[in-house]
Amino acid sequence: MNEQELRKALRSDFTSETDRFLIIKHISSIITANQVVGQEFVLRMLARLNDFQGFESVISGLVRQIGLFPYLDEDSLSFKDTIAYETHRPVGLNENIIFHHAQAEVYYALMRGENIVLSAPTSFGKSLIIDSIIASERYNNIVIIVPTIALIDETRKRLSQFKELYKIITHPSQSKSVRNVFILTQERAIEIIPEIEVDFFIIDEFYKLSPQKSDEDRCHVLNQVFYSLVKKDAQFYLLGPNIERVSTALLDNIKYRFIRTDYKTVVSERHMVRVKTGENAINKLIELSSELTEPTLIFCQSPASANKIAIAFLNSGKFSKTENNDELSYWLKDNYHSEWILPNCLEHEIGIHHGKIPRAIAQKCVKLFNDGKIKYLICTSTLIEGVNTKAKNVIIFDNKIARTKFDYFTFNNICGRSGRMFEHFIGNIFLFHEPPTAELPLVDFPIFSQNDDVPEKLLININEEDLKDSSRQKIMKYLEQDILSKETLKRNSYIDLDKQLRLATYIQDNIVKIHRILKWNQYPNNVQLKLACLLIWKYFVASNGMTYGVCSGEQLHFRINQFREAGSIKNFISTISENCNISDDINKAIELAFDIQRYWINFQFPRYLISLGDIANDIFKRHNLPVCDYSYFGSLVECYFIAPYVVPLDEYGLPVQISQKIGSVIPISPNIDEALSQLSSFVPSPRRFSNIERDFVNEFKKYI
């Protein structure tokens, strides 16, 4: 039997004439010739172990041979195999945790103090190695950098098992303990890293260190974080999937080992979905999905595409309405909008996950999917980047992220979401487009390579002794100018340096007029807020197009006032959607409201406002003028003009509306550590809190 014939045999129903021993014999021969290929066939056998009754001991021998120790039955091992099995058990973790051979190699290298850069498939179990490092208790301060807040939440929940050993910190405002695990996005890490001694750090999805056109700004911040951590001489573990190699040119003083492995614990089956000329692709998707009975992710290029598919699913009549999620659906309609597509989908066991959905609600959708309460999860790249699910099937409906075709690397990353160790040995991937050309990326660390494309705002954060001559020349004009201090430029280096200087020059040239308006503290009047918005837009955003529902400084000013006056997201949605008559327009209005809230209110405006104040104060001090202080108002905007605890608790999985409701029962501290302590013992009464609200609270309390 060749490989193709073996696959066909293992995909087919067995009959009384099927020669099971012959299949095992051929698989054994393949393992001898090529373990990586042989591993696929062992997993295929394990997926249908009931069809190989009487051959269990032989199959166990093959499992042992390829190093898949987690799949072995400990009680049936020989003495020799037991010794090998025990060497794959990490110290300090649950006694049932066993590494496979490739995991153990990485684990022992890290325990020897080596720096490891790991490229491995999604199903490899890279995160379990993080758990084992923490369990070893060898380090006092461990920093874990993740690309999204969704991954902060997932990682925090997983690592809550260590809360007796370490304080788990996810927010810059939290106080430090003697031993800490920091789980942060790069933007948050920038604030915290200078204040702590770091023993060990991890960068998840480390390929994001390499410049990407779609996310250049975040790439530069991540490089800055990486550089800062490396300069602390901390041991590191960088992990990500499908990387060909890393550029080592300028990492002369950093010793590390790059491990690239294709070791898989699940098998992915690819199936092309042929859409005939004139046939509607969404109808084909509905037909395919309705035939799949196991958990299915449906990948779309954008929130708009996800909503279009969700509406088509509902209108098809092929997905029965159930009562499983009725309480959640009613609650969402009552607290957001009665015609929002998400609650209507949940009633039919369909979920939606993308970056515009409120964080706690998006987390809830993933939980419902993993708990089997929804069968389908229509998602975008926000779910693909590291969030683990129990998906048996992945349907790749679009071959783009936003408007750009994804590359082979991203394609592989999406495919890796199918199947799950101990859940689904074989995952199915259904493709509506041909795969991209096979080409895996070379990851470059621009803060070390310092090539011609590296921007000045990144170079200015590099120590003098680490700058190349060409880099030093490139930033010389910023070091020699006398408009802004180097410290101010560095503090705000997420903003282009020339933009900072242009703003500073404008303030300098109009110092009397500008100081009179910008000198405010605490809370601005309307004129002061408007000027801040105009300056932010002209000098920081510098765009003529629409950016998350805003296209000018005047409109930014209007949106902030509009949100503040609404008083709640429900009222804000109502204001935005009041002239909409059809459901599609209403859903667009709802997501516009979410866009403005997430991007401008919660994130970008407060950050820009603090930078505006910082740059203005640099000029004011030179003129011996009173300084401004925008920190209070920036914090107020960031927390939706409500209370300091609502946004952090939303990240912890507690919706804003519920934390506000609790705040009307007990006074919640503005200090996040104190708030978490208070809520850990809070018991919501059935009289004041609905079943679904109590579910949210109880789920939240499990992991604090």
Image (cartoon, helix red, strand yellow):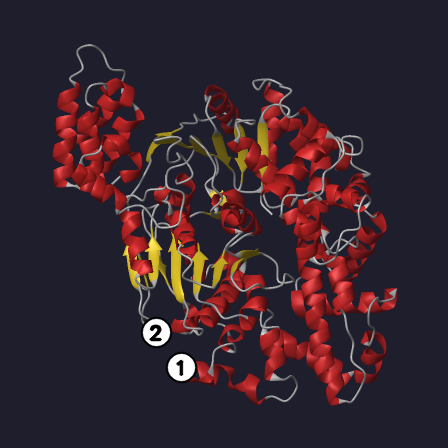
Quarter occupied by residue 360: top right
Label 1 residue SS: loop
Q: Residue 183: horizontal and vertical position, in percent?
A: 53, 56
Q: Is residue 502 in view from this perspective? A: yes
Q: Residue 265: horizontal and vertical position, in percent?
A: 32, 38
Q: Nearer the viewer, residue 659 or 429?
A: 659
**Label 1, residues with CA under 10 Å away: few <14, some 14-19, many ≥20:** some
Q: Nearer the viewer, residue 19 or 2?
A: 19
**Quadrant including the N terminus:** top left
Q: Nearer the viewer, residue 463 or 489?
A: 463
Disc ID at residue 468: 1
Q: Residue 426: horizontal and vertical position, in percent?
A: 34, 30
Disc ID at residue 164: none
**Quick check: 95 left or right of 327?**
left
The residue at the far top in this view is 16
- Say if 180 sits above or below 411 in the image: below
- Say if 559 sits above or below 422 in the image: below
**Quick check: 180 left or right of 124?**
right
- Mark 2 vs 1, N-terminal side: 2
**Label 2, residues with CA under 10 Å away: few <14, some 14-19, many ≥20:** some
Quarter occupied by residue 239: bottom left
The residue lying at 59 percent from left, 64 percent from top is: 176
Q: Is residue 1 in view from this perspective? A: no
Q: Inspect the image, locate mark 2, and give the three-letter code of the amino acid beneath it.
A: Leu
Disc ID at residue 250: 2
Q: Inspect the image, locate mark 1, and give the three-letter code of the amino acid beneath it.
A: Lys
Q: Residue 551: horizontal and vertical position, in percent?
A: 71, 57
